[in-house]
Amino acid sequence: MEIVSKEYRGQLISRHSVSTLCAGLVVASLFLSGLANPSVAQVISWSADDGGGAGSGTGDFFDTANWATGVIPIGNNKAPKIDGGGTAIITAAGTGAGVDTEALIAGDAGGSTGTYQMDSGYMVIYDAASSILGNNSGASGTLIVNGGTLDFGDVPGNGAGGAGGGLGISNAPGSTGRVELHNDAVLRSLDGWTLGGGGGDNAHGTPGAPSSTIIMDGTSHVSLAGGMNNRGAVSMALSGSAQFTLGNSKGPADLTGDFEIQNGLFNIGGRHGNSADIVVEDNAIFNLSALYNQRARATITVRDNGEFNIFNTSTGGTETDFRMQNYLGRENFNNDDPEQMTSTIITLEGAGKFTVDSNPNTFAAPGQEPFPDGHVDLISTAGLILSAGDDEPLHDGDDRNIQYRGGLTVIDVKDSAEFSVVQGLWMTLGTGGSASSTLKVTGPDATVAVGDLIMAELLDQTLSGGGVTFGDPLYVARSGTAELHSVITGSSHSTIQVTDDARIGNGELVVELDGYSPVSGDSYTILQTANSSGVNGEFKAVDLSLAPLSSGLSWDLVYNADSVVLSVLGGAFLSADFNEDGFVDDSDLAAWDTNYGLSGSATKADGDANGDMEVNGADFLTWQSQYTGPPPSSGSVPEPSSMLLILSVALPGLVRRKRSI
């Protein structure tokens, strides 16, 4: 790693050229197996057990009687280790302007446990690459920060000297590591974290994976210059007004912070059999520069005003670093077993927000990965890739980075939630027929916006011999499934807003009704493009089995140049014409009277005039206002269906394409 520019005491941004995938993953290599001898000169063991054994039992980190050698492990070449249980409590008492140590080690030996609890004050962990929580099988290490500031490595402005700021959390099969931040606690690092560093490739459901837990609440802050790589089972819960940032040691887009090119990424599944459960809620915020899921079964839930933001956390704006594609569900442990597929389920609800702004370079900058990983002429697969993906732009050629079969991805955007991708949403790019992705939108008040929508199609671009060859046609169909799933809950529905192109010809549409029975004239714009001719193709399949309509009604799907609109036709009958004989009269009142009070399952035939599945006074008022009287005894009155035919003949050519379903 070559330091391009660095000033520890000044305000310069540090940018590092990285010759490997990313610095955070280099740190991971240090934890492939338990660290028997941490790389510090003197490791001093904790001897207190909080009042029952050796030592003073005070639990005070700064009490000499609590350390086996009688020496407090602070200063250069000294590191604390807790293996025999107990909790070392760090407070402002005895810290003065701040203290430093070389590493934090808890739960080193197999089966051992240990906890650090920081309540106040300031501490720097200098050579923090040796820090580990839960190093060997059966070991458990915990770090709890209730207050104060803890710096791993020399965060700019906080002193001279120091080395990397990495932290290993659970480092062997059967080990556990836990980090908690509460109240106004602050943790900063010059590097990233390795989660489950000793994990290997296993079938999903295999017990004994390294287990990592991260909990934050209050107004606590974590900011890492690097990223995180999970190779085990990780559980992460951010709540309150907590903020977690990857890719900047001082917080999102803080120019005084330390960061690294090709970092700030979170790989939530670096090995087969990994799992991840991430919850961001209340007003908590998770900021990162890139998101991968190569092999895990993962769930991400953002709710109740929580935010999950992917952007350039180092300087702000769009992420542009090469090898920073965002992709979910790349490859499977067993492609023929649905239970062994990689999966990512993202649920957004209660004003939860998930945003992506990422347009990485398609070629290697000096000091980064060279050809054949990228090329200036490649078309970027920027934004977010579902059920496939790789670190670089997807292409065929020397490194075959379009070979992955793809797993399962679901993005479930519930009412009032927000999902946005400034660039493209690439749905189902895997080579396998079992690969699938779904964008599910519920209710009228969800916000869904993407730059481009590409459904089960891949760019045909081949990198060979130092150049790029493009296919004709440029887009080729994938064999997997890409699905838009609209859950209609009322007379209006959220529209997927697309800035440029919506390539839907190899996609599918599923429509579901939830608690609402549509009436004639209801109309729903499924998607809208700002580009006046942005709709490309028609859905190859439309499933309305979950959206049955009342007798006499039918769905009508219209493909305009810039929109796809689903409407309810038929029902030229008035809504209070419960028997649909063309008149609102006493026979309809009788139907209403017979079923008055029916709730939750009522249909129009029962006397439900407004489609709310109830028969009540509101329906009676509709009947009263629409009353026509009984049919006349004679005369020629056009039937409603005849009137509809007359209108359709008189007003042709209103739409470009339409399909009645």
Image (cartoon, grey):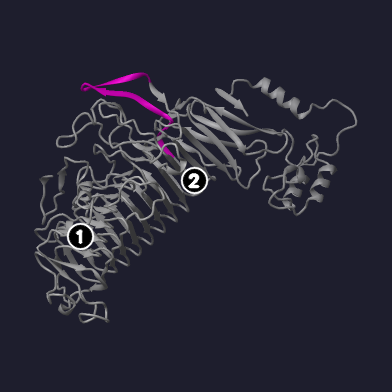
Residue lying at the far top in this picture: please name it. 472
Q: Quadrant of the C terminus?
A: top right
Disc 2 residue type (three-letter): Ala
Task: Please tell me whether mark 2 sits on a helix, a strand or a loop.
Answer: loop
Residue 452 is a magenta residue: yes
Q: Position of residue 643 (x, y in %)?
A: 74, 26
Residue bearing the label numbered 2: 446
Name the side, left or right, on which 648 lies relative to 427.
right
**Mark 2 vs mark 1, CA separation in Å:** 43 Å
Task: Please tell me whether mark 1 sits on a helix, a strand or a loop.
Answer: loop
Q: Position of residue 590 (x, y in %)?
A: 83, 47
Q: Position of residue 577 (x, y in %)?
A: 77, 39
Q: Nearer the viewer, residue 656 or 58?
A: 58
Disc 1 residue type (three-letter): Ser
Q: Nearer the viewer, residue 496 or 394?
A: 394
Q: Quadrant of the N terminus?
A: top left
Question: In this rendering, which labeled residue sits more in front, label 2 or label 1?
Answer: 1
Image quadrant where residue 427 sits: top left
Image quadrant where residue 657 sits: top right
Residue, x 31% and y 64% (percent of image)?
181
Circle 2 Cα neighbour tier, 10 Å, few/some/many (<14 / 14–19 / ≥20): many
- Magenta stretch in the rendered image: 449-473
Q: Nearer the viewer, residue 480 or 336?
A: 336
The answer, for residue 517, to whether it is visible in the render is yes
Residue 190 is a magenta residue: no
The reply to whether dot 2 and dot 1 touch (C-beta < 8 Å) is: no
Residue, x 32% and y 58% (percent of image)?
174
Q: Position of residue 199 (x, y in %)?
A: 30, 51
Residue bearing the label numbered 1: 131
